Image (tube, grey):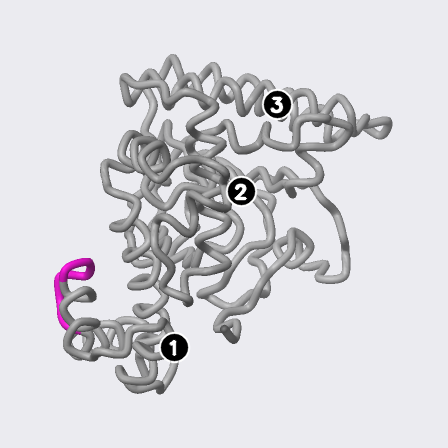
Amino acid sequence: MKELFPFYSIGHFINQPFNRTEFEVTLFAQMEEPDVEEIHKHSFYEIIWIEGGTSRQTIDYKNYQLSPNSLFFISPGQIHQFEEWRPIAGGSIMFTEDFFLADRQNRDQLFEHSFLDNFYTNQYIKLHKKDFTEVKTIIDLILNEQKRPDKDKSIIQSFLHVLMAQVQRSVDIKNKKSVPKRSLIVYKHFKNLLDKHFAENKTADFYAERLHITQHYLNSIIKDITGRTTTSVIRARSVLEAKRLLTFTDQTISEIAAGLNYFDNSYFTKVFKMEAGATPVAFKKMASEKYQKG
């Protein structure tokens, strides 16, 4: 499908669009407002930390109100809208998959973090002050190393790995649940496949076959992580794309349904309403008023 939104690299967010940097850490107090479209996608991961003030963020139609002692996570491919970023105290860590995985044999290591690449987890976590202080201590190490004239990429990568492990521990404590790493890895591989094939309206069996596991095992993993069946998650991904198309294109509902391999409009409307809580017509009206003002 044609890309609807600008896809930005880290360089765009430091107003150096041709800079191919794979890592940046910046404080909001020192950050120039980036010259980017209000609604966009990232080609990188971002962790925002908030020490003071509040901020509004939207990820794929979900709204978040950020407040002190909190973290906010953005993954590649998500539709992000940074509605308000001044005045807040805190900053942003931006890194690519290649930066995180450099010189690592285990390419699945990034997938072991439940707070990334997961449409069904909360993009936002409010921490107890003690837990936030522990996370911020590691962030300060990264900030200090980044400022050094002799900064060392391998040291920053090591600190980033420690930070991610500490954040995962904080998330597990907050959620009172730790998902097995193997399950997370399978889920993330499933999500990547789904992002490639959702428009084909494939069945759960299609994804299980490509992951070389049984449909029952896949369903148990998806259920454990998202609380939903595999079929429900597949359906939700199609509806998410339909929402985007309804909001940002002039395609008719019939055209959108057909593009997602739903050839019965009444069934598509039923599926859409089940997921979105409104018919496609009602959703389009609401979304147009919110996202296409003026």
Give the image location of residue 177, x and y in percent. 30, 19
| Residue lying at 69% horizontally and 32% vertically, measured from the top left | 101
Q: Nearer the viewer, residue 140 or 212?
A: 212
Q: Residue furthest right?
A: 150
Instruction: Kindly state the secondary structure of the residue where label 2 is placed.
Output: strand
Which of the two labelled residues, at mark 3 and mark 1, occupies the earlier sequence position?
3
Q: Residue type at mark 1?
A: Gly
Give the image location of residue 210, x and y in percent. 50, 46
Q: Quadrant of the C terminus?
A: bottom left
Report the residue marked by disc 2. Answer: 46
Q: Residue type at mark 3?
A: His
Give the image location of residue 89, x and y in percent. 46, 37
| Residue lying at 65% horizontally and 43% vertically, measured from the top left | 96
Asked if residue 5 is among those painted magenta in the image, a careful observer would answer: no
| Residue lying at 59% horizontally and 27% vertically, measured from the top left | 109
Give the image location of residue 22, x and y in percent. 71, 44
Q: Nearer the viewer, residue 29 or 206?
A: 206
